[in-house]
Image (tube, grey):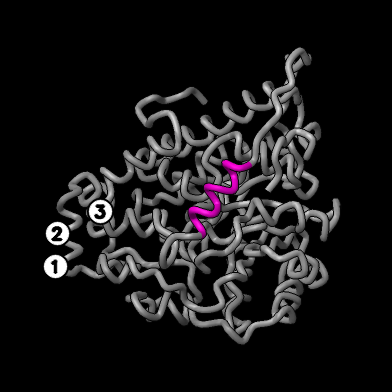
Amino acid sequence: MSFDSAFGYNFDDLRALAKRRLPHGLFEFVDRGTEDDLTIHNNFDAFRRIQLFPRPLVDVSKRSLTMSLFGKEYPMPVCLAPTGAAGLLWHEGEVAAAAAAAAFGIPYSMSTGSITSIEKVAEKAGGELWFQLYLWPDPAMSLELVRRARDAGYKALIVTIDTTVTPNREFNYRNGFTVPMKLTRRNVVDAMRCPRWAFGVMGRYLLSGGMPRFHNLPSALQRKMTDTRKAGLMPKNDSLTWDDLKRLRDMWDGPLIVKGILHPDDACAAVQAGADGIVVSNHGGRVLDNAPASIEMLPDVRQAVGARTVVLLDSGIRRGSDVVKAIALGADAVMVGRMAMWGTAVGGQRGVAHVLTLLRDEIDRVMAFTGCTSMADLNRACCARLP
């Protein structure tokens, strides 16, 4: 894929373009974390504290970004993270993002909170598809979605476990923003200030079937989830335990990935419950405010689970150098969320392809500077300062 300067040169350029294109409430829904955004700042600051050693006069003319997950090779150590409501940023934005991932040969993770259905993304985009699931209080709800994902050809199941209760995202209340969106005076005025979005995204949904809704919730909930301002997207799940994860393990034959782990003891508990992979994640700062940065906890989690468990990292990735740091400190690959969302917002499939091109080129460049030719060369010795 070639570089497209129309979408800018880095994360901040993409974010600025998205801010101009999207209604304020929708932009903040993606951009912000929770409460005072302290965890977002923790993620950013932690990556910046890690320094990389340049190692000159090493033959790096034959570099490879290839890595392996669950016995399959991928051309770069990046997956697209599950990001709910991507379809509000671009018409059928999930299809656009999945198609970009397919073109690069990397996994796309479909969120339970997506607008476009599991089946439509598989049909229209293809590629390596993973499905993200919440642990529902009623096991029948989980089984329903697991069956749909399996029947549609999804290869791995990601279960998110860090949303015990509804996060306190005060900015959503202030902006009058709900998902799915209800037409209120505030939302209409906000949308009309962004005519390209109003007609190109919301207008297309309204003309083709009405207000967008979540097609991947259990059928018993789809009719009820019309206003999430207080109740949140998902039912409260504060009674769930590791035994519920074990039951989910019995429902799914493929790789099972547990997302939302920061403590080494929880990583070990997940593996004992049957997890094949771990995502070291603070949910991009969107759950518990002032949680530790994911990258700071990564070395401890890797040490706790050992080399056999697949370890992914998300939260705070803005540069290819961040990806290199994560691999050096123990991750097998990273998952990219907001950066891909900004790409979706500004250009659909082209925008996400631009994001992946930026990351691929930056990873390759940083590897050359650090004297590394493969993912296996990246280790703690590459880092001058550790978190």
On the picture, is 175 further left or further right than 167?
left
Task: Label 2, secondary structure: give it.
Answer: helix
Q: Point out residue 73 in the picture as x, y percentages from the top left corner.
A: 75, 39
On the picture, is 304 further left or further right than 15?
right
Looking at the rendered structure, the kind of residue marked 2 is Val
Task: Out of 116 and 292, give the one closest to the viewer.
Answer: 292
Rendered image quadrant of residue 130: bottom right
Q: Which residue is mark 3?
A: 23
First-in-chain label (3 vs 1): 3
Q: CA distance from mark 3 to mark 2?
A: 9 Å
Q: Is residue 65 visible to us here?
A: yes
Q: Residue at x 74, y 58 (%)?
A: 277
Q: Which residue is mark 1?
A: 185
Characterize the magenta stretch by its predominant secondary structure.
helix
Q: Point out residue 195 in the picture as x, y percentages from the top left corner.
A: 18, 47
Looking at the rendered structure, the kind of residue marked 3 is Pro
At label 2, counting other C-alpha atoms closer than 10 Å, the crowd grade (few under 14, some 14-19, many 20 or more) is few
Q: Which residue is mark 2?
A: 189
Tags 1 and 2 touching, CB below 8 Å: yes
